[in-house]
Image (spheres, coloured by chain):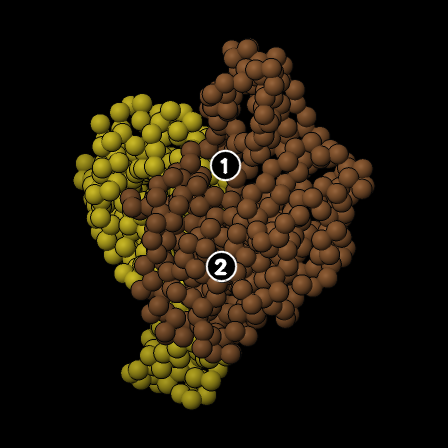
Chain colours: A yellow, B brown
């Protein structure tokens, strides 16, 4: 008998029939003798409907009241699933965030979980109940309702698994696992049986949005066994996220290809090459509340250098304005920008112990005439920026070059 | 400076614009220096939508989960009003039932309020906040969400006014007060400036559904000054519900005419006239969960009597079946029924001290050829059952006979 936490997202609970399917899946696990805690999102579209209603009322809705409002979405689905389970003869109790309680800080609309007492859930589980918890929400120390921000239900599930020392945390989505890359771009893309925690982090932040990145960090911190599965397939093992490299495993060098075309590139040309330049340029950008992703500064020449970074495409105009002002102040020559770019990355813990990965990547891109505009590397990934029209081609070329269509 | 509790029903908060109107009304009271607690219902139609969703999932939805679900309706409106108030520059905080907390028993879907600690609200009020409370909901001693049943928001408002010792509890509806009768039937119907608590109870239970009857009982018990007003009119004093007869006031003999065509009449003919008959007939009816309204038993003759009572029209067929079985058991001759009836009542504390009211009522009906099928009286009302096609005529005739179109 195991204790399993299962999380189902918005499309998995999109209507009454789908919620019945979730109940049947839960019933299967109960029939095998497992204890089950289920975490649910709101029905797909419901959170957006509530946000729209709030914005109709107030251009910038008060964050405390926003949380009171949008937390109702999950409250409806937990009641419905609990009814569906009882209809199958399975004992069940729904819990809102404050009923668990899921204790958070008071950062409305983006709260962080602080602690989860497990006593009440434990009693209900031992009493034979399935415990159905509203994802995405909690309660602060003053008794206010909080929400964890978009995708927070994944984090709720992992945090509950950690608090209950669950044997496994299963995240049910509309895909059946983590793939080597997006199958819509590369039909040969293959589901990974396992992916390391660090690879998953790189994949998630780079655009393979299967799991919310915070939930993966959380799982890593508390060593929660995390698995991604499809809620629309009857069987299947999905992808297991592992936290230790298996030394005996024939490790693939590269696990996957991530990509992202949400970014724009800004270059400050002819910057006086002296200490403090990065701070002088990026300080005002941060002050304008713009997040910076890649940063590249090459060696200078003739006492000047060029400084390039990328931001989210939505922030492009704002960041350009900021940089033009900065350029005038620090005596830089010119600011140029480009929002027709895409970032393509190869990710894999295997590259740590293999040389020549970067060379192979650049060679493959060059062979197909794809020019590289920026390069940035970490321990387990190499990212390049290319003209956005080449993105799909670059992903396909790299998928083939690293033989990702073949099982390791 | 007064402390005022205001309650707005579903049509008053039916959309974003109407909620803005509520905010403006609240703002007016704040501007006069009053402290304001607002109680809200769900947006009109929302509770029905949620109930339909629950019934789509489970034919008889689990009551605990039903309450988790339907309590979300008010949670949305309190957040929206709080946003609207902040948009007007007014400090405000929303409270769900469990946040107040409104402590109830654990009778899901029809819970009763047990206590309301006022400390938290008091702090927020003294801090300059408008406190916006979700009506209709509470929390039981195990931390479960409960609801008070249909119309429970009125009760929430009165209970809060009692707990806070508020100066006045204002119930905003889509009518501007309590009328001598329904203006749709008698255009000359007049708004009453005051109505006594007991009259209001009779009016409410007889079909003038302005206020939920439980809330009126509650107000009487805790001596809450209760006023009914229109949420769609700018000014106006509505109708004040009073709890003491004003001896100095020129009291109208009759305050209003109530009516109801939701009932059906059942007569058991030729019942052996001996003790215990009422119990033998009505016991099985109660066991079948059917509420009985009027009961009439006349003096018997030749050792038998006739026994007549009314039930809700929806329960007519069920009650007839029950009575036919009973009739066979107790040796009654026959059971006859009629669902084409209407009840018309005159209500007024003034009739206590005036003779001849009944005579005047029966005379007025007789003059217009309206036959009376049943009569039932209390201290402050006289009800008659007539054929339902005469209902409107009876109401008009009585309204005129008692000069209700003229101010007292």
User: Residue B54: which numbered mark, if any?
Assistant: 1
Q: Nearer the viewer, mark 2 or mark 1?
A: 2
User: Residue B243: which numbered mark, if any?
Assistant: 2
Q: Nearer the viewer, residue B135 or B299?
A: B299
> What is the x, y in percent for residue B121?
36, 65
| Chain-order first, disc 2 or disc 1 | 1
Task: Name which residue lies at 68% across and 26% down.
Answer: B338
Q: Secondary structure at mark 2?
A: loop
Compared with residue A193, is residue A185 higher up or lower down, i.e. above or below?
Answer: below
Are there few (<14), some (14-19), or many (20+) residues within 10 Å of tag 2?
some
Q: Nearer the viewer, residue A337 or A53?
A: A53
User: Residue B298: which numbered mark, if any?
Assistant: none
Task: Name which residue lies at 42% across and 54% down.
Answer: B221
Q: Quadrant of the N terminus of chain A?
A: top left
> What is the x, y in percent for residue A361?
38, 52
Task: Name which residue lies at 51% across and 11% down.
Answer: B329
Inter-mark Cα distance, 2 to 1: 41 Å
Compared with residue A37, is residue A49 higher up or lower down, i.e. above or below?
Answer: below
The answer to whether tags 2 and 1 share a subunit is yes
> What is the x, y in percent for residue B31?
51, 78
Task: Name which residue lies at 30% across and 62% down.
Answer: A142
- What chain does mark 1 sit on? B
> What is the x, y in percent for residue B216?
49, 52
Q: Answer with left or right where residue B389 lies relative to residue B180.
A: right
């Amino acid at each position: 008998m195991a204790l399993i936490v299962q999380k189902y997202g918005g499309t998995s609970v999109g209507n009454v029939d789908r919620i019945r399917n979730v109940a049947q899946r839960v019933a299967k696990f109960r029939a095998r003798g497992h204890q089950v805690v289920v975490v649910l999102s709101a029905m797909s579209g419901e959170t957006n409907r509530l946000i729209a209603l709030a914005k109709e009322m107030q251009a910038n809705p008060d964050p405390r009241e926003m949380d009171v409002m949008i937390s109702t979405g999950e409250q409806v689905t937990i009641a419905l699933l609990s009814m569906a389970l009882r209809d199958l003869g399975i004992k069940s109790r729904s819990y809102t965030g404050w009923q668990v309680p899921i204790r958070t800080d008071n950062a409305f609309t983006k709260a962080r979980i602080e602690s989860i007492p497990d006593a009440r859930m434990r009693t209900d589980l031992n009493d034979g109940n399935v415990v159905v918890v509203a994802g995405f929400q909690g309660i602060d120390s003053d008794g206010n309702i909080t929400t964890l921000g978009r995708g927070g239900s994944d984090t709720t599930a992992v945090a509950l698994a950690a608090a209950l020392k669950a044997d496994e945390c299963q995240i049910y989505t509309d895909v059946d696992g983590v793939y080597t890359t997006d199958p819509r771009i590369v039909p040969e893309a293959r589901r990974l049986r396992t992916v390391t925690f660090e690879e998953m982090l790189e994949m998630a932040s780079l655009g393979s949005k299967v799991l919310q990145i915070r939930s993966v960090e959380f799982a890593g911190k508390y060593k929660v066994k995390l698995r991604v599965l499809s809620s629309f397939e009857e069987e299947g093992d999905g992808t297991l996220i592992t936290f230790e490299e298996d030394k005996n495993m024939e490790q693939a060098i590269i696990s996957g290809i991530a990509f992202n075309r949400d970014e724009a590139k800004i270059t400050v040309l002819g910057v006086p090459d002296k200490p403090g330049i990065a701070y002088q340029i990026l300080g005002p950008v941060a002050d304008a509340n713009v997040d910076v992703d890649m940063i590249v500064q090459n060696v200078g020449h003739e006492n000047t250098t060029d400084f390039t970074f990328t931001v989210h495409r939505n922030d492009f105009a704002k960041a350009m304005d900021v940089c033009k002002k900065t350029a005038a102040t620090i005596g830089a020559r010119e600011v140029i920008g480009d929002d027709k770019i895409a970032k393509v990355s190869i990710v894999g813990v295997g590259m740590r112990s293999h040389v020549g990965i970067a060379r192979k990547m650049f060679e493959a891109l060059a062979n197909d005439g794809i020019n590289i505009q920026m390069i940035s590397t970490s321990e387990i990934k190499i990212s390049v920026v290319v003209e956005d029209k080449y993105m799909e081609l670059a992903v396909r070329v790299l998928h083939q070059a690293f033989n990702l269509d073949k099982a390791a």
